[in-house]
Amino acid sequence: MNRTAFIFLIAAVIVAVGLALTLVDRPDEPTSGAGSAALLLPALSDRVNAVAALEIVGPEGETVASLQRSRERWRLRQKHDYEADFARIHQLLRDLAQAFRLEKKTGNPDWYGRLGVVSPGKAGADGVLVKFPDLDLPAVIIGHQDPAGLGRYVRLEGETHAWLIDRDIDLPLERMEWLERAIMDIPAADIRSVTIRSADGDEVELRSGNEPGSDWVMLDVPAGREVKPSWELAQTASVLARLNMKDVRPADSVPVPEDAVTTIFRTRDGLQFVARSFSDDRGHWVHFSVGEADASDNDTQTDGPDLDIVAVDGRLSPWQFAITEERFERLRPTGGDLLLPPDEESTASE
């Protein structure tokens, strides 16, 4: 396997103009030009690396995401402390630390709704609140986008006036959007063979040639039957490429049923990914375990894996991942699924 292609996508860096929505202050609330050179959160810029917790609160006052930094990674409490999207969190902290106040806006609470800066949980609220539970920093209500495209309206909790800042901070209200959703990315060219075993005893083995990109073949084809084209067989081998999840749960929360389908992917450099897949009322699920391919498999071209298999298995095996129906079906074809229908075989052979 090309190591540069074997990407688990773990976070790598710690790292309408005519409307009255602009709500500049009324004559009795003059706009202050002094704010245009001031940071929104000056205390954050020097302490951004000390932030170890964030809380995202939706308009109705519901906690969308409780984020904690643990073991050098951000994790989402509401999803069993699964790994959060580092890039999103990093960008949020950077935007808040570097945001400048461009213009002071209304201090009249009756006008907050026009800007989206009503406190979450109160009538008319539609902004998102960002809290810093572990630091003495004010929470920030992220409101509507400025119609002119300059940035966002915000208000610090405890302050009366809203502000226009120079950053367009757009925060998702879907919990899954705060997770690192990539599971793995192993292209079909890095897969040497795939074995699919069903609970009823049906077993299918697919193999590629010695060179990456070689045609895929099906072994032990029933007499008198013809296999679908190589590119269709390769659809199963490519299941692990850019594989993302729809949901996640601890592996021990729901036992893998006895009728789960087992799909074994063997890579060209000697790794073995065992995927056990099944469905329930919450989606289509797969559990992965990772090990070293059997050395007796003479077709595996390897000098021994140089990847930390324990670390890879440690990231995947504690979880069950929900995947799309399309990926789920490609993961577990039966032998019959990969054979041409009898009425097409004669035409294909002509």
Image (cartoon, grey):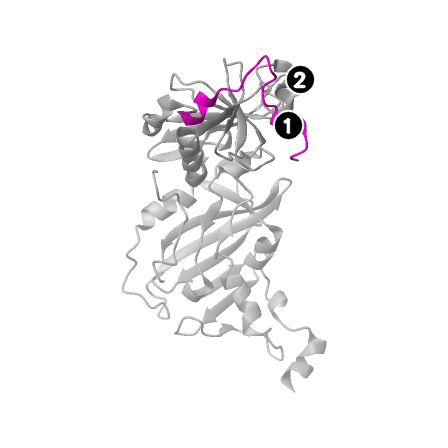
Residue in the picture at 58% in, 36% down: 148
**Above or below, comparing residue 24 to residue 255 in the picture:** above
Labels 1 and 2: the sequence-earlier one: 1
Residue in the picture at 33% in, 50% down: 309
| Residue that lies at the very extreme toward the front in this rendered image | 27
| Residue 221 percent location from the top left of the image | 56, 74
**Above or below, comparing residue 257 to residue 2 in the picture:** above
| Residue 106 percent location from the top left of the image | 58, 18
Of residues 179 and 347, the one nearer the viewer is 179
Spatial separation of the CA atoms under disc 1 and disc 2: 18 Å
**Above or below, comparing residue 206 to residue 79 in the picture:** below
Q: 332 left or right of 240?
A: right
Say which residue label 1 marks: 21
Say which residue label 2 marks: 123
Placement of the N terminus among the 4 image quadrants: bottom left
**Magenta part of the protein: which range?**
17-39
Element type at marker 1? Answer: helix
Does the image show residue 57?
no
Task: Mark 1 vs mark 2: give the one in front.
Answer: 1
